[in-house]
Image (cartoon, rainbow, N blue to C red):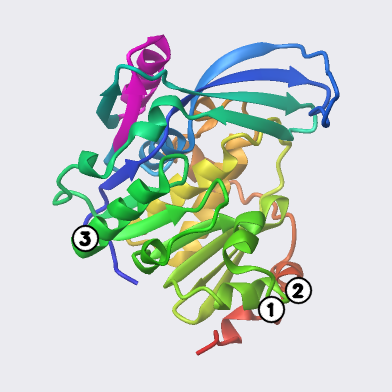
Amino acid sequence: MKSPRTAAVLVAGSANLDFVVRASHVPTAGETVLGRDFATYPGGKGANQAVACARAGGVATTMLLALGADEPAAVLERSLHDSNVTAIVRRVADRATGVAFICLGDDADNAITVAPGANEALAASDLPPLDSFGTLLLQLETPVETVAAYATAASGAGLSVVLNAAPAQDLPAALLAALDVLIVNEGELATLAGDQGSLSRTLDGLRIPCVVVTLGARGCCAREDGRFTLQPAFVIDALDTTAAGDTFCGAFVAARGKRAGLAEALRRASAAAALACTRLGAQSSIPTREEVDVFLESDPREAASHAELADYCGLPPDPSSLPTAP
C-alpha cells in the first residue's frame, strides 16, 4: 500500500444540513411518532469526514464540495471554516444545498433520508491540482462516476486513495482498482463482496491493499499486507451515533497520514468515534485531537476481548497468524 507523501488530506464529497428530531424510537414503516427536540446541524458524509481529519486528526485538510446559493450553504461553509478546513466550493445556482432528515431514537439509533441537491452536481472537472496532498478521501454521496474519476486521477498522481463506500452500492472495477484503502461497515461489505461464509473470508475476497470493516459496538477488523488487525470498541454511554462512522474515517486517514501503524490508527479512530457517540449532532459531536489523547490516556475499557472479536470475524485467537488468500 502506498504511504502518503504528506499528511495533508483532500476530501471530496458531500455536505448537507441535517434536520434532526429526537423521539422515543425510530418509526417503522407507516408509523407516526411524536418527536421532542428539533435542531439543525452541519453534516454530510464528506464534510463530517473533513472535519474529523482536521479536528480529531489534527492534519491540514481541504474539502472539495458543491453547494447551492442559499442559507444552508452559508451554515456549512462556516462550520468547515471554524474547523480549520479549507473549502473549495463548486457553486450551483439552480439547486438547493443538500439536506438530511434524521430521526434520533432514545437508544441512539437513527434513520436518515438524504436529499442530495447540489451534491449531485460535483463533476470530474472540479478536481483541483493534487500536488500538495498525500491522501484523497472519498465517499458515495456524490455521483459514482465523479468519485471514480477522482480516484483514478489521484492514484495516477501518487496519492493514497481512500474510499468509504457509503451509502452501499455496486462499484465499477476501475474505482476499486484505484483504491489503497477501503472502509466499509458490514452491510456495505456484503453489497461489495457478498457472503463468503465469514467476515475474514469476505475480506480476503477483496483485492484492495487495505480493507477496514467497522462493526458498530463490537469494534473493527482490518486486513492489510496479508495480516489481520482487530480493535474492540470502547465502552461508552451512547447518545447519538449519527457521525460515528465518519469520525472513524477522518481520524483513521489522519493517523495514517502521520505514518501511524495500522493498529494505532484503528485505536485512535475507534476512540474518536466513541467520543462522537456521546454528543449530539454530526460535526458538532466530533472531538478534538487533544480530547482523543486524554480519552486514550484514561485507559478506556474495551467492549470485548481480542479473542471474542476474532471469533466473531472467523479468525483464530491470534489473527496475525492467519495468512490471507493468495
Instruction: Quickly name the residue at label 2.
Output: 311
Q: What is the x, y in percent for residue 6? A: 22, 55
Asked if the residue under mark 2 is in contact with the one under mark 3, i.e. CB atoms within 8 Å, the reply is: no
Q: Residue at x 34, y 65 (%)?
A: 178
Q: Residues within 10 Å of mark 3 (few under 14, many from 20)?
A: some
Task: Report the side of 157 relative to 247 (left or right).
Answer: left
Q: Residues within 10 Å of mark 1 (few under 14, many from 20)?
A: many
Q: What is the x, y in percent for residue 48? A: 46, 35
Which range is magenta? 63-84
Task: Report the side of 285 relative to 71 (left or right).
Answer: right
Task: Report the side of 244 relative to 77 (left or right).
Answer: right
Q: Does the magenta-highlighted stretch encompass residue 268? A: no
Q: Tell me if residue 63 can be seen.
A: yes
Residue 133 or 66: which is nearer the viewer?
66
User: What's the mark number on residue 315?
Assistant: 1
Give the amino acid type for the residue marked by disc 1 in the picture: Leu
Instruction: Quickly name the residue at label 3.
Output: 5
Image quarter of residue 258: bottom left
Q: CA distance from mark 3 to mark 2?
A: 36 Å
Q: CA distance from mark 1 to mark 2?
A: 6 Å
Dot 1 or dot 3: first in sequence order is: 3
Q: What is the x, y in percent for residue 212? A: 53, 62
